[in-house]
Amino acid sequence: MFFGVIGREWIAFLANNADSIKTVYKAIRQKWLDLSSNMSGQVQRVAGDRFAVLETALYLAKDLTQWTEEESAQAILKNFLNWKEEFGENSREESALIRAVTDWLLINEAAFIEYPAGPNAKTPLKIAGVRVLADKAAKEEEHYFIYPKIFDEVIDGFPKKMALGILFTAGLLKKPNKPEQGYNEFIFKIPKKMIGKTARAYKIMPFSDEPETEEEAE
C-alpha cells in the first residue's frame, strides 16, 4: 500500500518517539479502564486495549489530521458506544454460559424434587436437586438447589472457576454468607427437612439479575 507523505511522516514519528508514545498510551488506557470499570470483563478488555490504541493513534496524529484532542476522543467514544450497543456488555462466552444454564433449567424442571411437595408429586428417576417454590408469605423467591455433580455437567465445556464467577455476577448463582469449611464458597447445605437427609448443592435463582450474597438456609 502507498500512503504518501503523511504515511512516511507518521512512520518516522512512531520510530523517533517510542518513549513518549508509551507514556501517552498508558494514560489513555487508564482513562478507558476507568470508564469501563463497572462493565463486563470483555468490555473492559476491549476498551483498555483496542479503543485505547485507536485513541492513542488519533491523539498522536493530531498534527497530521488537524483534529483536536477533544474531537479525537469524542470520535472514539462514539465508536465504542456503537460497538457496545451492538455486542452488549456480556461476551459471547458469558452469554452462552448463562443461556446454557437457564435453558437447562427449563428443559429439566421435572428432574427436581419440589418443596413443598404437592399432593401428586412424583420422585424423578434421576434427581438433579430440589426446586424450592416461591413463598410469598415468607418473601422467598423460587430457587433451585442443584447437586454438584449435575451442576458440573451443566457447565461442561466452560472453565469451572470462570463459570462460577460469571453466574454469580449475573445473579443466577448465590453464595452463603458463611461458606462451610472444606467446600467451595458457593456450596449451600440443603435443609434436611426438604429431602430427609443432609446434602449439599449450588443455589440457583433463575432469571434474577442481582448478584447479592444470601444467608445460608438453616
Image (tube, grey):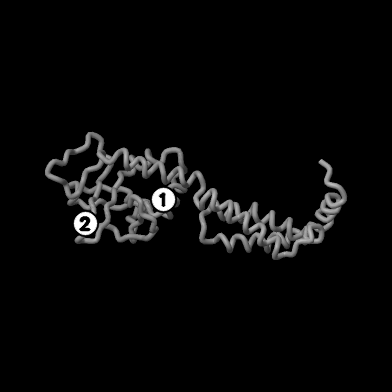
> What number is the disc on residue 199?
none
The spot of residue 186 in percent (x, y) is 36, 53
Residue 19 appearing in the image:
no
Q: Secondary structure at mark 2?
A: loop
Q: Are there few (<14), some (14-19), or many (20+) residues within 10 Å of tag 1?
A: some
The spot of residue 4 in percent (x, y) is 86, 47
Residue 150 appearing in the image:
yes
Q: Is residue 56 left or right of residue 201?
A: right
Q: Residue at x 86, y 50 (%)?
A: 8
Instruction: Name which residue type carries label 2.
Output: Asp
Q: Is residue 88 above or below residue 103?
A: below
Location of mark 2 (residue): 135
Q: Is residue 110 left or right of residue 1?
A: left
The spot of residue 214 in percent (x, y) is 32, 60
Q: Is residue 121 above or below residue 192?
A: above
Location of mark 1 (residue): 167
- Mark nearest the camera among 2 and 1 is 2
The spot of residue 173 in percent (x, y) is 37, 52
Q: Residue at x 35, y 56 (%)?
A: 175
- Give the mark, 2 or 1, whose residue is nearer the N terminus: 2
Q: Quadrant of the N terminus?
A: top right
